[in-house]
Every structure is written in structure tokens, then in C-alpha cells.
Amino acid sequence: MTTAATILIVEDGDEYLENLSRFVPGPRYLQAKGGRAALSLLESEPIDLIYLDMRFDRLAPGELLGDLDALLARSGNRKKALGTLANHQGLYILEALRDAGYGGLPVILAYDFGAEPERFARLAERHARLTWMPDAVGPGEIRARIERLLQRG
């Protein structure tokens, strides 16, 4: 793997940063704890790939991206609306990246779409360089996926 690659890990904890740094050495890893922080880092750092968590349940509600009012109007329940934002925050961040002009960057979404191929196909139509990775994979598979995405660039 090229050591010149810079990978931005977007997560609300430290698990992906710790695991990738330890088990998939080589790239330079940066971390953003949410969508706004990711967008800010992208403005100041050259990023080759984004490793994006799906669920952000440790992020303060005010830091979540997405239209809380629209979700609240649809569900009528603030807790449920916030839960939807947190549980699908990776998708909201993905859209924010695209809207900000970073849609050409390769993204690995940390989520298992194995049982939802149609859902992933719809996402991939909007985000051509998107792939997914379930949590229960080994470092070799993660490394191979990163290398494939970086080679396609």
C-alpha cells in the first residue's frame, strides 16, 4: 500500500482510527468526529480516501447533520427523529460531502449492506466511488479494499 495515501476516518469514537492505525499500517490517518469536522479537514488537507462510520450515537444532537425538523414533522417524536439522524448519520455526511464538491473521493462506508443490495445500489448511483465494509472483516480485506479504491483514482 502506498504510504503517501492520506485516509480521513470519520467516526464519533476512536475504534476505526485505532484499528486501522494498528492493523493496516502505511497510510497517514486523520480523524474527524463528525460531518462538519470532516468538511473542515477536507478544506485544509489533501485526502485520498474517506473511511466513514454509519452510526454516530455519541455525537451531540446539535452536531448531527440532516434536517431534524423534517424528520420530526414526519415522525412526530423528537427522540425517534434524533435516533434516525444518529443511526444513519453516515448517509447524511455522505450527502454533505457530495454537496460540498467532494463526491469524487472514494468512500468506504462502515456498514453491512449484504442484506440490503438494492439500498446500496441506490446509494452507489449517487456516489460512484462508494463501497461498504462490514465490521467483521480482517485487516487483509480492509487493506485490499483500500488499495483497490486508491488504484482506481
Image: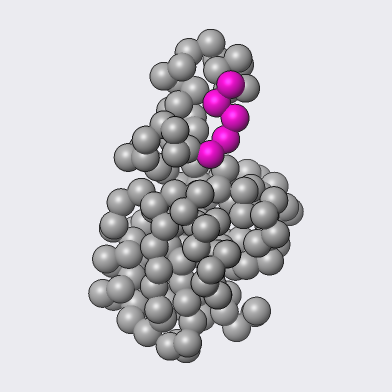
Quarter of the view holding residue 92: top right
Q: Is residue 15 above or below residue 36?
A: below
Which residue is found at the position 62% from the left and 54% from the top? 97
Q: Main secondary structure of the magenta part?
A: loop
Asked if residue 90 shows in the view, the reply is yes
Report whether 98 appears left or right of 49. Answer: right
Residue extending furthest front?
44
How far across and how far down the image is residue 1, in percent? 45, 87
* Camera-nearest residue between 50 and 124: 50
Quarter of the view holding residue 119: top right
Which residue is found at the position 46% from the left and 53% from the top? 37
Asked if residue 111 shows in the view, the reply is no
| Quadrant housing the C terminus | bottom right
How far across and how far down the image is residue 117, in percent? 61, 49
Report whether 81 appears left or right of 122. Answer: left
- Per the rendered image, the range of residues in magenta is 65-69
* Camera-nearest residue between 145 and 100: 100
In magenta stretch: residue 151: no
Q: Is residue 60 above or below residue 105?
A: above
